[in-house]
Image (tube, rainbow, N blue to C red):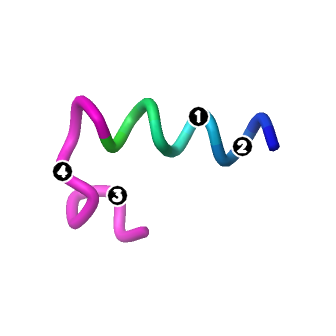
Amino acid sequence: MEHTITVLTISNVIPAGDIGL
């Protein structure tokens, strides 16, 4: 769960495409 929240938080700052979700 923590990992999911972290990804959501990062995607808020950086475009999802940048992370390659």
Residue at image coords 72%, 43%: 3
N-terminal of the pair, mark 2 or mark 4, is: 2
Percent position of residue 6, x then y: 58, 34
Mark nearest the camera among 1 and 3 is: 1
C-alpha separation, residue under disc 4 versus residue under disc 1: 14 Å
Which quadrant is home to the N terminus?
A: top right
What range is drawn magenta here? 12-21
Residue at image coords 42%, 69%: 21
Q: Which amino acid does the dot numbered 3 rest on?
A: Ile
N-terminal of the pair, mark 4 or mark 1, is: 1
C-alpha separation, residue under disc 3 versus residue under disc 2: 13 Å
Q: Give the labeled residue for mark 4.
A: 15
Q: Give the labeled residue for mark 3.
A: 19
C-alpha separation, residue under disc 1 versus residue under disc 3: 12 Å
Q: Are circles 1 and 3 on residues that touch, CB within 8 Å?
A: no
Percent position of residue 7, x then y: 52, 44
Q: Residues within 10 Å of mark 4 (few under 14, many from 20)?
A: few
C-alpha separation, residue under disc 2 versus residue under disc 4: 17 Å
Secondary structure type for disc 2: helix
Q: Give the labeled residue for mark 2.
A: 3
Instruction: Inspect the magenta stretch and tell me whether residue 19 lies in it.
Output: yes
